[in-house]
Image: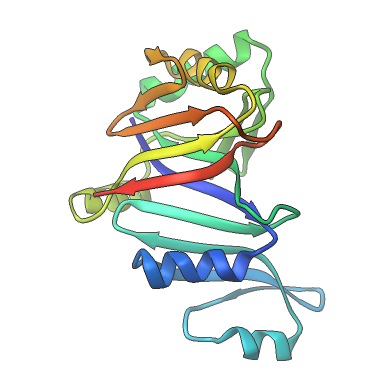
């Protein structure tokens, strides 16, 4: 079980993107959006000034380093909030998470066999993946760069931790739950709904 991905929502997409690239050494995978009515995926190397000239409307900016994938999406909050975290599971773990979510009557959405989302009813979602070739390749880079801690601010940290621990069948300590090699920590003092990004620790 690996936590390899998190999806951020912020009104300051360009600043957040620049932080991951300039300060944390992430590479830009692509920017996804529209020019007019046409969906476009723009490869790295095209500056924002050129995209503005073309009338590009960003939907997602995808960044990656080592075994960590981060997506930044335009939204209403200055400080980034987490929409969902992405988990790589083995086949048995995947089936068990789906079974637990079904038993709790949580909403499960499958998108074309590529992604499966589970609502937690605690302000964020889980994106769960069984073994996949592209994911195996990503996780093979964990020795180079991996996420060891992810800290999120919330109004109800223990409630947000509890549902995660229950769905993944993991132990928890207050607002902490260890997902594979990553400590996911929910801290008090945050907003209701989606938790707010507070800190990351990479190794």
Residue drawn 51% across the image and 62% down it: 62
Query: For this view, does 159 lie left or right of residue 11?
Result: left
Give the camera-side residue of 28 and 175.
175
* Residue 63 in picture, x, y percent from top left: 45, 63
Residue at screen point 51% across, 39% down:
85
The spot of residue 107 in percent (x, y) is 69, 24
Number of numbered discs on residues: 0
Q: Which residue is drawn at 44% across and 15% down?
A: 174
| Residue at the image position 71 percent from the left and 52 percent from the top | 77
- 153 left or right, relative to 202: right
Left or right of residue 151: residue 67:
left
Residue 47 appears at what percent x and percent y? 56, 86
> Residue 102, how many percent across, how many down?
62, 14
Q: In which quarter of the image is the N terminus?
A: top left
Q: Residue furthest right?
A: 37
Against 139, residue 127 (above or below) is above
């Amino acid at each position: 079980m690996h936590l390899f991905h998190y999806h951020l929502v912020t009104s300051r997409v360009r600043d957040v993107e620049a932080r991951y690239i300039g300060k944390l050494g992430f590479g830009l995978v692509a920017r996804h959006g529209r020019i007019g009515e046409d969906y476009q995926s723009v490869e790295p190397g095209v500056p924002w000034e050129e995209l503005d000239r073309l009338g590009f409307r960003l939907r997602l900016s995808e960044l990656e380093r080592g075994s960590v994938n981060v997506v930044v999406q335009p939204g209403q909050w200055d400080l980034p909030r987490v929409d969902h975290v992405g988990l790589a599971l083995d086949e048995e773990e995947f089936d068990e998470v789906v079974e637990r979510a079904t038993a709790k009557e949580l909403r499960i959405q499958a998108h074309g066999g590529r992604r499966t989302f589970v609502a937690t009813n605690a302000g964020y979602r889980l994106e769960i993946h069984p073994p996949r070739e592209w994911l195996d390749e990503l996780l093979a880079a964990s020795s180079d760069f991996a996420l060891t801690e992810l800290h999120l601010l919330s109004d109800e940290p223990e409630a947000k931790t509890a549902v995660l621990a229950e769905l993944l069948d993991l132990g928890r300590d207050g607002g902490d739950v260890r997902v594979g090699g990553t400590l996911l920590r929910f801290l008090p003092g945050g907003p209701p709904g989606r938790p707010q990004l507070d800190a990351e620790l990479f190794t």
